Image: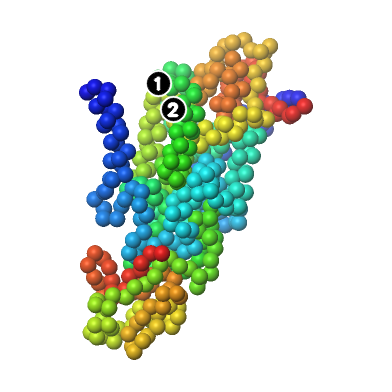
Amino acid sequence: MQVLLPGRLSGYGFTFWRRLLLSISFVLLICIPLTHRIFGITVVQGWYQSLGIGKLRIVSPLEGLQSILTTHHVHVPALIGMLIPVLVAFFLGRVFCSWVCPISFLAEGRSFFSRHPPGRKQDRIVLPRQMLWYTLIADMLFALVLGAPVFVFLSPPGLVGRELMLAILFQTLTLEGLVVVLVMALELLSRRFYCRSLCPLGALLALLGSRRRLRMVWHVDSCVACGRCDAICPLGLAPSKAEADSPYCWNCGLCSDHCPHDALRFSWRSPS
Amino acid sequence: MNRRAMLRNLALLPGAMVFYRSQHAHATVFASPLDVNRVRPPGAAAEDQFAGRCIRCGRCVESCSYRCIHLLDIRYGLHAGTPVIAVDKLPCLLCMDCVTVCPTGALTPVSQSEVRMGTAIIDHFACAAWTELALCRTCYDVCPFKGKAIVLAELKPAVVADACTGCGLCTHACPVSREQGEKAVNISPR
């Protein structure tokens, strides 16, 4: 059974709310160490690799899983902490990527200031989509062979948070912060190059979200094949060919916001 | 270059990585980064498990009130991003904030007296008290477990290894320096 969800929230498209949440998430990464330093407030600590709210620790599932698999040891608070992002991904898909991740914030900021309207023209070099899964497999193998979750040190989503914390609390930046610069430079090859092909965390979330309930559904009867959705999709998917149903879709809502014929709408698919 | 030569060179690459030694005296790609006066934070899991349990989230670094925990840089390979305390520069004051925030159990909650980051070892040939240069008892005075972990035996300090937490307050305070940045009393990691 499919429940069609409204095409706009309180009169604003999804893009508005998504950019708002991305901005809040990024500002939070600055505020957490800042309030820690100035006011000594430690109720909220960390960044999205391991966010601590009081006694609850929300743990990034990729690193948590690798830690369990390499040490054969399960720390129960970590298991509980991983449950939250896993459940979110399971039901909503990889919304973390498009609605929360600081890399998305930086990439959106870059396209915000770009002179050219977003479209397929900006996708100069596109790797095959399956590259995302190969990245995840390679990362897991690397971790298992070395016996430690090694990639997490260079993971761009975590790096943004870590560099901000180090900058605010220690007045220092580290060499690996350049990885974030590199990821932004990859945007010159195609939009969201890193997110499409090289992010193991995104790959894991996409895998978890393969059977998500929240989906972007293409209504073929309303579609006039104008191609606006295909052009705007930052992951290079073609919603007009129902590709928003694939595991790669991250429920950003851009296609829905840009469809003038209301042919793309979020819907909640409940088991019947 | 023919295919055989290229494959041979590719096979050497992992071997080269294993034996890589950077210019920094203590940075090695796979071996533990622990060394004299370089210890893991309190409540640390066994060293062979530590790199696997630690998800390099930096919560311990953030929570440390004295900013003595720092993350290892990329030269430490497998251990890059894991926390270490350089006790000669900034000793651990056993505030125990870090042990409660670790999400994966790389650091587990312990009480102050149960902490075993390492053991203090006094160099009798460098120590001012033992060489009878002065009636120095600095290490004894600053020890948070004065009389239990460090005792005065005939006015000379002696470490009781079973009770020493390895916090490094003695090392940091020791006025006698040795070569390579060491002091007359140093912490040997667990």
Is residue A191 left or right of A99 when viewed as pictured? left
Q: Is residue B117 above or below residue A147?
A: below
Q: Residue at x 24, y 82 (%)?
A: B131
Label located before the other in sequence (1 or 2): 1
Residue A174 visible, this orientation: no
* Position of the C terminus of chain A by quadrant: top right
Report which quarter residue B148 is drawn in: bottom left
Marks 1 and 2, how far apart at CA: 9 Å
Residue A101 image offset from top left, x and y in percent: 51, 38
Q: How crowded is mark 1: few (under 14 residues within 10 Å), some or many (20 or more)?
A: few
Could you tell me if the residues under marks 1 and 2 are in contact, i.e. CB atoms within 8 Å?
yes
Chain holding disc 2? A
Which amino acid, mark 2? Phe
Q: Is residue B36 above or below residue B79?
A: below
* Position of the N terminus of chain A by quadrant: top right
**Which residue is more in the foreground, B43 or A181?**
B43
**Which residue is more in the foreground, B156 or B41?**
B156
Q: Residue at x 45, y 74 (%)?
A: B162
Residue B34's label in the rendered image is: none
Residue A158 image offset from top left, x and y in percent: 46, 43
**Which residue is more in the foreground, B163 or B183?**
B163
According to the picture, the residue beneath numbered tag 1 turns out to be A125
Q: Which residue is drawn at 55% across and 26% down?
A: A248
Residue A193's label in the rendered image is: 2
